[in-house]
Amino acid sequence: MTKEQEGVYYFLTCKNRLTIETNFQRSLNISDHTVYPESTEEEQPGPSERQSALQLIDTLLLDVVEDAPRKVLVALRERVMQTDLSLLQQQSELKKLTEVVEKVTAPANRIGTLLSLPTAETAHIVVGGAEYYANIDPRLKNEQLEIGVQILVNEAFVVIETLDYDKSGAVMKISDLLPDGRIRVGQETGLNATLLIPAAVLADVKLKVGDEVRTDSSHRVAVERVDPAQKKNYFLKETPKVSWNNIGGQKEAIEAIRDTLEHPLLHPELYARFKYSQPKGFLLYGPPGCGKTLIGKATAASLAHRLQEEKKEKVEEYFLHVKGPEILNMWVGESERMVRDIFAQAREKRDSGYLPFVFIDEAESILGTRHSSRSSNILSTLVPMFCAEMDGVASLKEMVIILASNRPDLIDPAILRPGRIDRKIKVGRPDKDAAREIFSIYFDPELPLAKNLLNEAEGDQAKARTRLIDTAVEALFHPGAENRMIEVRLRSSRREILSRKDLLNGAIIASIVERAKEKAIKRAIAGLAEGITTEDLLDAMSEEYKEGEILPPTNILEDWLTLIDHDPKNVVDISLLHEKKQNHWPRKSVI
């Protein structure tokens, strides 16, 4: 028997007819979903008119006592119930289908850009190139309505939703900033220029002439500041904390820098009394590998430290390391723009409380002498641009400009004149004492030494280290034939023989020490005696001069002139000397 039949029998077995009728009346009120309007007693339908089919069948079951009619009614009730359930399911599916049809047949919402809000209820928008004053859906919050944001409008052009900012658009360069906040963009001022309004997202962004901004699809709103494709951040985020103690053999150069750079900033009142004109820039010149870049970094770190220590000023160095060839660009005007960007970065950081240092390595590559031909030489415009930027620097208080070059004779005289690069400081090759000092820097006191060296020094590690360094220095500066490398013929017909000591620099000494360490490590891995020996250092020295590519691989004049410490104008010929078993020195001219 089904649940419905059990319910019928329950009603039939009840003794109280009034209770049965009351329960049925309650069920009628619950199951009847028909809503009737308010009416008078004469207009209200009767009980039979308000009952559903199942309720009428239940009423008949109460009145019929015979089994045969009652079984028919029960079967009829089951079929009616199944039909009602099926109808309800079909109605639910039809409702879902109707919603889908409404969605797929509804017209698409248009996407536009919000330009302004004239009132709290209206918006000035642009959709497809046309402008509208549209109503705003009251359900939208005011903080969602930002200038430049994308919006959705319906068929009635009512703003119904806000989207994010457009992710694509044309990139244009700022040529002018108007007082009312609008932005003029274009390649040249006045030529095909366009005025844009800044989006709300750019309210806290500091824009300047030369910046590039991205516009929305309507080309009316600037929505983002973008970095130029060729722009490079030359700032070293972690400037190496190099001190003067890390530089060996350059006492004269370091003293000259400290006298002309640190003293004017540490004692400005004294220099003001003497009406001393502070220098703007410095030139560090000399052979490669002698520590010009290292001196530049140490200058930045040391000066900032001294200002904090003695002047009690909270100053942090901002080191801009620029390599000359990085500035060169094949496109017209790009190299000049990079120079402007470098000085603009320095000035911006100075306004933020930093002490900017602009260090330009290989300066001769971008600041070389200008020739008479002004048609295709990029230096004809790059050098004047650099001069103009330097003229805008008042003194060391704004920024410190340091140039480094192996060939100062190739730098344009307009750059090196007083008032721009005021000090020329030579960073020369180390002598014997300087070489010993550089060896002491790179040869750490805690490096393991061979037992025979320690035994000779009676177990004194420092004494054994000093003897080893002295042996290496004496071998480098020995005047024997094994150290000869180059013969230079001068215009005065004088010939000079250059040996290893004449080509020595700090980079070579550092490499010799590293090669000696490698030999000691390989021997320790093989299970042999540990520690650096004298033979390791001497063999490393020979290998460095033989395999370290100290000599230029080509016969290009400029490469060889950077190697030797002679005036290029006086050099006539350079020859290589090759040692043979017969101690004969054949000369091979490379120039």
Image: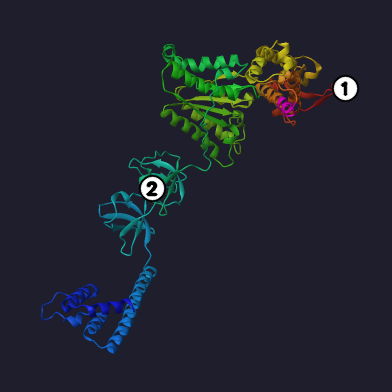
User: Which quadrant of the structure image shows residue 569?
Assistant: top right
Magenta part of the protein: which range?
519-527
Q: Is residue 136 above or below residue 13?
A: above
User: Which label sits on residue 196?
Assistant: 2
Q: Who is closer to the viewer here, 415 or 316? A: 316
Left or right, 160 with reference to 369: left
User: Counting other residues with Cα less than 10 Å from the Cα at mark 1, is it few (<14), some (14-19), or many (20 or more)?
Assistant: few
Q: Is residue 498 above or below residue 62?
A: above
Give the Cα distance between marks 1 and 2: 80 Å
Q: Magenta region, mostly helix, strand or loop?
A: helix
Q: The residue under label 2 is which amino acid type?
A: Leu
Q: SS for tag 1?
A: loop
Residue at image coords 23%, 82%: 56
Q: SS for tag 2?
A: strand
User: Which quadrant of the structure image shows residue 152?
Assistant: bottom left
Left or right, 77 with reference to 554: left
Q: Which residue is mark 1?
A: 581
Q: The residue under label 1 is which amino acid type?
A: Lys
Left or right, 373 with reference to 318: right
